[in-house]
Image (cartoon, rainbow, N blue to C red):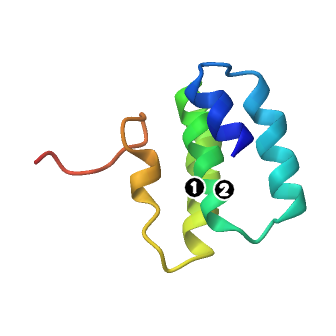
Amino acid sequence: RTGQTLNDLDCYGEPEEAYRKAIELDPHLGILKAMYARHLATIGKDAEADELYQKAQSMTDQDLRPYLEGTPLDRTPNR
């Protein structure tokens, strides 16, 4: 939650450390990796974000695409 909050407040340098620490503590939580991927996409690290998102999605049956909405990696078809 710390990383997500910092990201939402446009404190883009600080969330990386929070996300990395959280992933270190719970490396099997795909949704956390998807949230970090969103942060990475927000700050322009699209290749790293896409790779992390693919890993996250492979860890769960849950559709994680909503976490990328509004980022450069958003592949939602136009409605």
Kindly report which numbered mark, 2 or 1, lies closer to the viewer in this rendering: 2
Q: Is residue 55 left or right of residue 2?
A: left
Asked whether the beta carbons under mark 2 and mark 1 sit within 8 Å of each other, the answer is yes
75 lies above or below 40: below
Q: Is residue 28 left or right of residue 48?
A: right
**Seen from this angle, which residue lies furthest left?**
79
Q: Of helix, strand and loop, which one carries label 2?
A: helix
Q: Amino acid at mark 2?
A: Lys
Q: Amino acid at mark 1?
A: Tyr
6 lies above or below 34: above
Q: Of helix, strand and loop, which one carries label 1?
A: helix
Residue topped by disc 2: 33
Could you say which is closer to the camera, residue 50 or residue 14? 14
Residue topped by disc 1: 53
Could you say which is closer to the camera, residue 37 or residue 22? 22
Rendered residue at 15%/45% (across/down): 78
- Going from the N terminus, do you reach mark 2 or mark 1 first? 2
Image position, residue 45 (x, y; %): 61, 31
Q: Which mark is residue 40?
A: none
